[in-house]
Image (tube, rainbow, N blue to C red):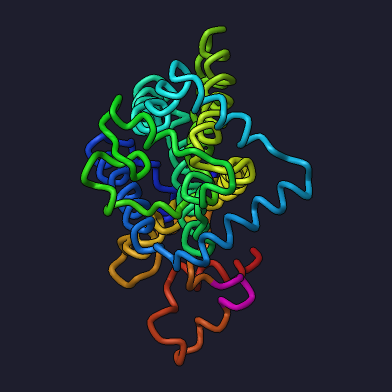
Amino acid sequence: MPQTETPGTEVALRPRLRWWTELPLILLVYGCYSAGRLLARGDVTSAVDHGLAILRIEKALHLNAEHPLNRLFTREPWLGVPADFWYASLHYLVTPAILVWLFHARARHYRAARTWLMTSTFLGLIGFTLLPTCPPRLLSAGHGFVDTMAQYSSYGWWGGAASAPRGMGGMTNQYAAMPSLHVGWALWCGVMLWRYGGTRLTKVLGVGYPLVTALVVMGTANHYLLDAVAGVAAMGVGLLLAPRVMRAVDLLRTRPARRAAPAADGTGSPIVSAGCQTSAGERIPRQRESRLDPAAGPDASPADVGEETPTPAR
């Protein structure tokens, strides 16, 4: 016999995502990210020490991608100027655009993709807080780096303070270099384009966008190579954590509904339909004999008596 479902215990349907709830959520996460960058302004001496430590590690590993790229961007304005525009603007434009595209065109994948991005962003914020790092462009000139954002500031809206608009440099944390979320977000965008774009062009963009972003952040002297690697690692950890985050959110959503499930008989016990499910107060047949005892109270019913009394033989 098919079993019926106890009212109030069925799994709640996942609510449909709406843009007027998604937009405030995304703005809240980005606001926390921006505020965290400001609050995480560590001691300048420690930030410089961390930056120099990264350079020493890269030297020990025979890695030196930053210097040749920075010299190239400094010497060739036709490369340096577009790279500065790329660094200052595209992560503000491409990432939200892909979120909107997923929301409208790939809705079934949107929630997982959004959760991955947000989880990784919070991991990056933890990195900014625990490890304030001086970017290459802010090291002393003896280390051989040139701040291309300052060199080409007359071409754009930014001043000498990273990618901040002129006069707003004090509102940014210039020591939030580790990990590079420019690279992390670009990697996320690339994966979305590769997996859900559906055309050869989107696959090319999916590979090219994060690769060019990695070259840009190093060539403009805003990040070390290990910053870019850490950005990729943060996205990897975020990808692993995202399913657990979604399950935790679903659990929090369904728990109040289960607690508020209405009682069917007014006594708090669930309905048993056609005897196919066992209610909280149900007893096995051998235990029902005790209901015939006058001390058993109102639990004993004619139905129980007829059920347990044998029919006399004729």
Tell me what residue is drawn at x 54 percent, y 51 percent.
178
Q: Residue furthest bottom?
A: 295
Where in the figure is residue 230, as x and y percent of width and height? Answer: 61, 47
Depicted 229 relative to depicted 70: above or below:
below
**Residue 103 visible here:** no
Depicted 295 relative to depicted 218: above or below:
below
Depth check: give the residue in front, 29 or 213. 213
Depth check: give the residue in front, 21 or 308. 21
Q: Is residue 187 magenta?
A: no
Depth check: give the residue in front, 144 or 87. 144
In this rendering, position of residue 227 left or right of residue 30: right
Which quarter of the figure is the C terminus placed in?
bottom right
Tell me what residue is drawn at x 60 percent, y 71 percent.
284
Q: Give the overall secondary structure of the magenta segment.
A: helix
Where in the figure is residue 148, as x and y percent of width and height? Answer: 43, 33
Stretch of the chain drawn in magenta: 283-288
Depicted 69 relative to depicted 146: above or below:
above
Which quarter of the figure is the N terminus placed in?
top right
In this rendering, position of residue 105 left or right of residue 215: left
Depicted 304 relative to depicted 145: above or below:
below
Depth check: give the residue in front, 189 or 159. 159
Tell me what residue is drawn at x 55 percent, y 32 percent.
70
Tell me what residue is drawn at x 21 percent, y 45 percent.
167
In this rendering, position of residue 103 left or right of residue 157: right
Where in the figure is residue 200, as x and y percent of width and height? Answer: 56, 7
